[in-house]
Structure formats: structure tokens, C-alpha cells
Amino acid sequence: MNPILECRDLHKRYGLKEALCGINLQIEAGHITGLLGPNGSGKTTLIKMANNLLTPSSGEILINGKKPGTESKQIVSYLPERTYLASWMKVHDIIRYFTDFYKDFDPTCAYEMLRNLQIDPDDKLKTMSKGTREKVQLILVMSRHAMLYILDEPIAGVDPAARDYILKTILSNYNENAAILISTHLISDIESILDHVIFLQNGTVKLQATVDEIRENEGRSVDSLFREVFRC
Amino acid sequence: MTWNLSADRPIYSQIIERVQMDIVSGVYHPGDKLPSVRELATLASVNPNTMQKAFSELERSGLVHTQRTSGRFITEDTVMISQLKETLAEEQIITFFQTMKKLGFDKKEAAELITKLSAEKGEK
């Protein structure tokens, strides 16, 4: 079986600056992977290439065995670091928009999550707090029945109680044949839901291991290992 | 029900300990059906694969077993459960002795202290 996401000697240069230098990795179905690294380590660059928003300088990135494109967008549910939704839209409008756009979007699922997080579908994005807007976006992304979910900093602006709810939502919503890639700085909040972690440093993979391997071998959490590896 | 998982030890081994404790303390009874791996994973906010790994380990030890179509059950072997109870108690006592040693009590002194305190507390 093909890995859902695969990078082969992937490079990305912005002018003279090399953002990614030779990434090799595979993400298999059924796994939740954490993409961790300090600011500027290449996390978002990698994620953007997986979504065809950037093209590799050399090497390749494959989604379900194919180059990112229209086809891959049908199976990848992507939460970008910045919003792309118009602020005048009501949640209702956006849900209709998503239903039109994606065959695998499940509005019932979205409305249920909105209810649980007490978000009124008649509210406009414009009138919402930053955290609430983030919740709405994550709800939309998790309401698709995708094969790969790519979440770029999904919980940064969200309060701890909602964060717990969101993590539980991620766990209960994704099916066993899907994979999730989460980039985040809030490691301690999410490490118990991760299978694997990938540490990126200056555009290279510094470490790739399972959470329990790290805990077993290092006798400490991924969060505390991260703090040591990337100590400033 | 919250699962207090500590950050510095493997998650699957903490799940195993937790389930063992629940079996010994009677939260689960011999022969009880367990919730699905997925439900338990959501409940504990852990990765389903980690939960699965913990249960594979528990199955290997014989404490739980899977019936192909109907799910996963706690063993009905009460002898095994009482053995587990004893093992867990021994582990606690060994940890206790280690802490007491750090405090400067040898095993005999620690045991005397226990006898003394249990006599006092016993009247309550």
C-alpha cells in the first residue's frame, strides 16, 4: 500500500535561502503525526508543498502516490495557518460553500460540533473572536471525510477547555484509514494523541520516532526533549 | 473519569497499569466486557494505536481476551487477578522501602514504623 504522504529528497529554495534541504519521510494511513520544529524550520513550507501551494525546487512530494494537484485536494483536508474565508460570511454560508466544494463534506457533523462549542451558525466571522474563528475553521476541516488531514497550528488561539474538546473531536472523527499531520508548538497538549513525531530543524529531519519510543528511551516527554534539542 | 497520565513515561505502559488497577480494585469485574479501543482512546485522550498496543500487551498477559465477534473481555480467572493484586501490592511496598531508604530508615525500622502507625490509625 502507498503511504498517504511521501517526500523523496525534497528541496525548497527561496532565492538563496534553502528552506528545506533533502526531506525524506512517509506518513502511513491510520497514524497521527506531529510535525514539530522551531520557527523557521520549514514546517509550513513542507505543508504548503503538500497542498500544491508551493512547488518543490527538487525532489518530490507525493500524496497517495501522486503529485499534489486537483486530485489530491479531494482527499486532503487542509487547515492553513491563515484564514482564507471572507469575514462577511456567516457560518451557515460557509457550510453551504464547503458542501458545494467538497463531496466528502458532512454538514450534519459540522453543525453538531458548532452546537457543542456553542457557536451560533448565524454569526458572521467578522464578529467573532480570533479563537472562535479558529474553532470554526477547524470544525470545517474536520467535518470532511478525507484521507489526509493537514493541520497547520490548529489549536494555538483556542482556550484550554476548547482545546480538549478539539483534540477529542480529532480522535473520534478521523477514521482508521485516514492520516493526520499536525504542526504545532503546543507539544505538551497534543503529544498523547500522536503516534509519531518529526522534528524539523533548519530544513532537515532531525529526529523521527514514536512518542512512546521517546518516552521510553529518554525517560521524558516529547515536550521536554524538544526544549532541550532546540534550546536557544 | 479522567486519566492522569504522566508526561515522562510511555503512555501505553501507564494505560496498562491503569487497567490492571481497575481490574484489581473492582471497577471492572471478572468477565466484564470492555469498551472498544476507540471509545477508550477518546475517553483517555490518547492515540487509538497506543490504546491498541496497551491492550495487545494485556491480552498477552492473559488479563483480557478477545472474542472474535463480540469484543474484548476481562479474564474470569480469579486466581490470576489475585496474583496480580499481590504483585501490585509488592511493587508498592518496594517503592515505599526505596523512599524510606532515602529518608534514612532501613527495612526493619520502616516496618516498625508501619506497625506503630497502623496500631494508632486502627482505632479510627
Image (cartoon, helix red, strand yellow):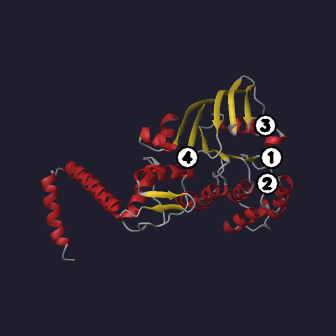
Q: Nearer the viewer, residue A193 or B30?
A: B30
Q: Chain of mark 3?
A: A
- The residue indicated by pointer 2 is A104
Q: Give the farthest residue toward the top.
A: A16
Residue type (three-letter) at the residue carrying disc 1: Gln
In the rendered image, is residue A226 in sight?
yes
Q: Earlier in the sequence, mark 4 or mark 3?
A: 3
Q: Quadrant of the N terminus of chain A?
A: top right
Q: Residues within 10 Å of mark 2 (few under 14, many from 20)?
A: some
- The residue indicated by pointer 1 is A74
Residue type (three-letter) at the residue carrying disc 3: Pro
Q: Give the farthest residue toward the bottom.
A: B124
Alpha carbon of mark 4 to alpha carbon of mark 3: how far? 28 Å
- Contact between labelled residues 1 and 2, with CB atoms less than 8 Å apart: yes
Q: Earlier in the sequence, mark 2 or mark 1?
A: 1
Q: Chain of mark 1?
A: A
Q: Residues within 10 Å of mark 3 (few under 14, many from 20)?
A: many
- Contact between labelled residues 2 and 4, with CB atoms less than 8 Å apart: no
- The residue indicated by pointer 3 is A68
Q: Secondary structure at mark 4?
A: helix
